[in-house]
Amino acid sequence: MARKNLPLSRVYRLLEPGPVVLLTTAARGRPNVMPMSWHTMIEFEPPLVGCVVSDRNHSFGTLRRTRECVIAIPTVELAPAVVRCGNTSGRTVDKFQAFGLTPVPAARVAAPLVAECYANLEARVVDTRMVPRYGLFVLEVVKAWIDPARKHPRTIHHLGMGDFMVAGRTIRLPSAMR
Amino acid sequence: MARKNLPLSRVYRLLEPGPVVLLTTAARGRPNVMPMSWHTMIEFEPPLVGCVVSDRNHSFGTLRRTRECVIAIPTVELAPAVVRCGNTSGRTVDKFQAFGLTPVPAARVAAPLVAECYANLEARVVDTRMVPRYGLFVLEVVKAWIDPARKHPRTIHHLGMGDFMVAGRTIRLPSAMR
C-alpha cells in the first residue's frame, strides 16, 4: 500500500472518529499485533493518545518494557484478520504470519507498520502513571503515514460481541471546532 | 423520546465505537452542554470513561466543581444542533434553549439528560489526577438510559474541521472479544 508522510497536526482526524486500530509491538525482533478500541486523543500537537491495554494481553508487557508501538488503522476489508488477531494471543501465535499481515519496518520505532493498513502511526510511551490503576498508557505519535489514495476509508467501529459498525457517508457542517 | 434503563454492563457498547457525544453539566440550576469526541472506555463494569475537556471550555470548571455530568449520545438528525453547541460558549448562551434541546432531570446527578438523544449516561467524576496535565477526567457511569426503539442509531463521528462520518451498516464477525 502506498505510504506518504502525514503531518502530525492531522493525526487527530484519524483517531477522533473512534476506529478499531491494530497496536503493534516488537520484543527481541518478534512482532506482535492486537486490536484495540479503547483509545482517545489527548492533545492535538504533538499528538498525544491515551490507550487502555489490559495486563491480560501479551502486548501489555512488551509495550511497558519497550515503550514503543505502532497504531495501524485497518479498513473493513481487514475485519476478518482483525478479529482473528483478537481471538488469539501473541504468546503462542505469530499473528502477522498466521493472518496474512505484513510487518514493515518503521522509521522511528522498532514496532512494525502493518502494510495492509491505510494509516500507520509510530508512537512512544510518554506517561505510564495511569498504567497500574487503569492500564492507560499515554502515547506520543512521532511519525505518521497514510495511503494518499484512500479518500474515504471504511474504518470499523466495535459495538461489542462481534458486531462492528462500518464507517458510512461523510457530511460537512459549518463547525468552528478544529 | 422513550427511555429505558440500560444495564451498566452494556454501556461500553455505546461509547466504544467513538461517537460524538454531548456532555451536560449544571451549575446553580443552570444547565450547559458541549460536544465532545475525546473519550474512551477505561473499564467495563462499573463503566469507567476517560474524557478530555479543555480548560478553555466553560464546562471544564463546572465539571471540576460539581463532579457530575451526563454523556448524551446524539444521532445524525441532531448534527446541526451539536455543531451549534460547539460553536458557542455556555458563558453567554443558554444552549438548550437556543438550539432546541430539552433538558430532563436525571436520576442520580444534577446535570440534565438531553431528551432528543437516543442514549444518556449519568456519571460522576472519580479521578482528577490527570486533569492538571491533560484535562483528562475519569468518570464512572452510575445510571444509563436508552431509547429501546432505536436499533441502529446513526451516530456521528468527528473527522475534524466540520466533517463528520455517519455510522453505516453493521457487520457481525466470529469475535471472542467482549
Image (cartoon, coloured by chain):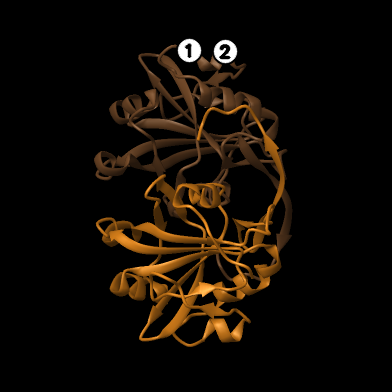
Chain colours: A brown, B orange
- Using the image as rendered, state which of residue A103 and residue A129 is in the foreground: A129
Amino acid identity at mark 2: Ala
- Using the image as rendered, state which of residue A44 and residue A49 is in the foreground: A49
Numbered disc 1: what chain?
A
Mark 1 vs 2, N-terminal side: 1
Q: Quadrant of residue A153?
A: top right
Identify the residue under disc 1: A93
Mark 1 in CB contact with mark 2 (< 8 angstroms)? yes
Does residue A49 appear in this view? no
Report helix, strand or loop for mark 1: loop
Task: Give the image location of residue B5, x and y in percent.
Answer: 52, 60
Numbered disc 2: what chain?
A
Task: Give the image location of residue A11, x and y in percent.
Answer: 53, 47
| Relative vertical location of residue B145 with respect to residue A79 in this rendering, above or below | below
Task: Give the image location of residue A89, x and y in percent.
Answer: 45, 19
Does residue A86 appear in this view? yes
Amino acid identity at mark 1: Val
- Tell me, yes or no, whether dots 1 and 2 are on the same chain: yes
Task: Give the image location of residue B153, x and y in percent.
Answer: 67, 56
Figure quadrant of the N terminus of chain B: bottom right
| Relative vertical location of residue A166 with respect to residue B92 in this rendering, above or below | above
Marks 1/2: CA distance? Answer: 7 Å
The numbered disc on residue A98 is: 2
Number of numbered discs on residues = 2
The numbered disc on residue A153 is: none
Q: Residues within 10 Å of mark 2 (few under 14, many from 20)?
A: few
